[in-house]
Image: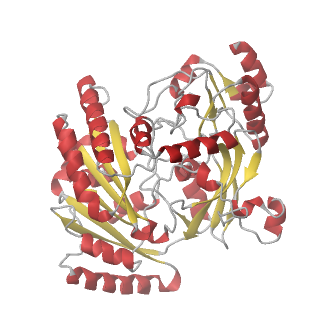
Amino acid sequence: MVDDIISKLKSIFKDENVSNEPAILEQYKSDASLGFCEPMMPRCVVWPENIKEVQQLVQLANNLSLSLVPTSSEPPRFHGTSVPKKEGTIIVDFTKMKKILNIDVKNRGVMLESGVNFAEFIDAVKKAGLRPHLPLYPYAKKSVVGAALDREPVIIPKHHWDISDPLLCLEVVFGTGNMFRTGAAAGPGNLTQQKEAGGAQKNPMGPAQFSPYRIVQGAQGSIALVTWATLKVQRAIDERKTFFVTSDTLEANYDLIYELLKFRLADEMFIVNNLNLAVLLEEDQAGIEKLRDKLPEWIGLISLTGIGELAREKIEWQEGDISEYAAKFGVELKTELSGISDDKVKVILEEASPVPWRLKYKGGCSDIFFISTLDKTPKYKKITWDAVSKEKFNTSDMGVYIQPTVQGCNVHCEFDLYFNPDDASAREVTLNSFKTASQALIENGAFFNRPYGIWADMVYPKIQPLIVDSMKKVKKIFDPNAVLSPGVLCFKEEA
C-alpha cells in the first residue's frame, strides 16, 4: 500500500521531491515544543514546487482518503502545527517554493511564495528600499507566510491596523482541490491583467462580501494550503533613535505607554523583563545571565524612526512630545542601558535571528501566549507566577514579552519557560508548569486566539456549542473529506 502511494505521488512530483526515508521522516514526527502534541511518524513527505502539484496532491488525498499536514519553515519548528495527528499522514513541505513573485514599491506590497523565509525576505525587501513588518527578532529560516498565517504579532503597533496584518491577499488550494484567490487578487482579470491595469493585490477583503482569508488565517492548515501571499511593507527608514523606560514593577510605566499608543507616537514598542531582553541581545547562557543581572526588572523599548530629508526633524518632534508625556507621568526616558549597544538593539528590530532566540538561553523554551489588554497583564503575570511556583519551576528562568497590537487596542502577552531539554527532571517540571499555568490563565479569561495542540482541548469545551458547530460546518464546506490537518482546533473527530 505504501509503495503504491509513493508511486502515485511520484507521478505528481519529481522523484527527489518525494521521500519516505526514516531519517528524513524523523524530522517531522515531533518539533522543538514541549507538551503541545504527541510525536507521530508521517507516512512520507513531499516538496511541491507549484500550485498544479498542490492541486493534484489534494485531489489524490481525497480519492485515497489521505491526510495532509503543511509546513513551510525549516527546523526547529514549534507548537505542533507540522506534526501529524493521524496515522499515515503526508507532510507537505513548502520550503522549495521560494519565489518572491513581486515587490511593489509604489503600493508597498510584496507577493511571495510560502517557502520564502525571513532572511530571504528581509534581504530582498531592503534591497528594494522598503521596510518589512517583522515579529520580534524572527528566526531566519521561519516562513514569512507561515508567521503571517499564524498571526505572529509584529513589533510596530501603529502600523498594525487589523489583527490579520500584515497579511493581505492569498492564493490557496482548498480541501476540495479548488484553487482560489482572495481579496483584490480574485479579480477582475488574472494577475498579469491586474498588474497591467495597476492592480496591487493589496486589499484583503472580498471578493464581494466574502473575505475567505479570515477563515484561512489561524486555521493551522485545516481549511486550505497556501501557495503565495501578499504582505504589507513600508518605506525604508533613514534614522532611528531608541529609548528605554525601566521600572521595578510591570505596570509602573503603563500610563506613558497608553499615551504613546493613543497618539501613534513611536514605531517599535514593547515591554520585556530583564531575562528576555538579555536573551534577545546575548548569544549564550553565561552572557545572558551576566547582562540580566545588570538590568532593571522591567524594560519598555520605544523606538523612533524617520524617513527622507526630514527624518531627523521627525524624530526630534516626536522626542519632544514623548519627553513631555514622560515628565507628565514621572517616567525617566533613557537612551542607554548598561551593557546594551545601539547596534545590538538595531539587529533585533531589523534583522532575523540565525537561531530561534528563545532557544539561546538553555536550549529549550515552552512559551505561553494569549491576547489581553495592557491593564490586565499584571493579573496574568501573578497567575502564571503562582501556577509555575506550585509546580516547583524556578521563576528566575521565566521570560516575559508584552507586545501592543492593533494600535494598542490589545496586547500579545507571553510568558517563556526556559529549560534544559536534556534534563529529564527539568522537562517534567516545565511541562507540568506549562499545563497548570495555561489552564489557570484560560480559567481567568485569557484569550488564547492561537489554540495549538493541547490548548485547543482546554479552549473549545468553554466555547458555546453553536460556535463549534459553525466551525465544523465551515470545515465541511471547504474540506469535505477532512484531508487537511485533521485533529487540530475543534476538528477532533476527523483525526
Give percent across and percent down for residue 162: 52, 65
Give percent across and percent down for residue 197: 82, 71
Q: Residue at x 59, y 62 (%)?
A: 125
Give the quarter of the figure containing the C terminus: top right
Residue 335 visible here? no
Please state which of residues 356 and 204 is positioned toward the viewer in this rendering. Answer: 204
Quadrant of the image occupied by residue 34: top left
User: Is 148 placed above or below 373 here?
Assistant: above
User: Is 163 placed above or below 241 here?
Assistant: above
Please state which of residues 300 and 433 is positioned toward the viewer in this rendering. Answer: 433
Give percent across and percent down for residue 354: 45, 45
Q: Residue at x 71, y 12 (%)?
A: 1
User: Is 96 placed above or below 67 here?
Assistant: below
Q: Residue at x 68, y 50 (%)?
A: 228
Residue 212 visible here? yes
Q: Residue at x 49, y 43 (%)?
A: 465
Give percent across and percent down for residue 108: 63, 69
Residue 421 is left or right of residue 225, and the answer is left
